Amino acid sequence: MRIIIKIIAVAAALWVATQLVHGITVSASTTAGEVGTLLAVALVFGVINTVLKPIIKTIGCAFYVLTLGLFALVVNAGLLLLTSWIAKQFHLAFHVSGFWAAFWGAIIIGLVSWLLDLVFGD
């Protein structure tokens, strides 16, 4: 049940990012299609973060220390771009159109996810 709530929270965060960041789009033709796309992309984003983020943190540990953690913003933007690419491979109507859109989108997704975790708990 916890995983389902987390996926829904990330889908909500992705939706907020699509509303606030020019360059992050969900181009589904119906509301149900948009919700389904956001849930599928949230699942992909969760898998990518679960698998790749620890590896990147381990390998890039020096960059995290040297930049006082700001390198995490670049990593999160890269993971969001990777999510967009994988979504395209699965023919999902989700697109991130460049690094800066991914950068700001990752910040918004992180903040909204954090706020939803505060509200709903772990």
Image (cartoon, grey):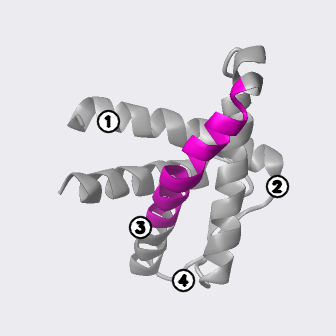
Alpha carbons under labels 2 and 3: distance apart: 22 Å
Q: Earlier in the sequence, mark 1 or mark 3?
A: 3
Secondary structure of residue under mark 2: loop
Closer mark to the observer between disc 2 and disc 4: 2
Hey, what amino acid is under mark 4? Ser
Range of magenta residues: 42-61
Identify the residue under disc 3. Answer: 39
Identify the residue under disc 1. Answer: 117
Q: Earlier in the sequence, mark 4 or mark 3?
A: 4
User: Can see residue 48?
Assistant: yes
Classify the position of the N terminus by image quarter.
Answer: bottom left
Hey, what amino acid is under mark 1? Asp
Alpha carbons under labels 4 and 1: distance apart: 30 Å
Name the residue nearer the viewer: 26 or 60. Answer: 60
Q: Earlier in the sequence, mark 2 or mark 3?
A: 3
Hey, what amino acid is under mark 2? Gly
Judge the density around disc 1: few (<14), some (14-19), many (≥20) Cα neighbours within 10 Å.
some
User: Can see residue 104?
Assistant: no
Occupied quadrant, residue 112: top left
Secondary structure of residue under mark 4: loop
Horizontal and vertical percent position of residue 70: 71, 23
Identify the residue under disc 2. Answer: 98
Name the residue nearer the viewer: 116 or 1. Answer: 1
Q: Residue at x 24, y 37 (%)?
A: 122
Closer mark to the observer between disc 4 and disc 1: 1
Identify the residue under disc 4. Answer: 29
Alpha carbons under labels 1 and 3: distance apart: 17 Å
Judge the density around disc 3: few (<14), some (14-19), many (≥20) Cα neighbours within 10 Å.
many
Hey, what amino acid is under mark 3? Leu
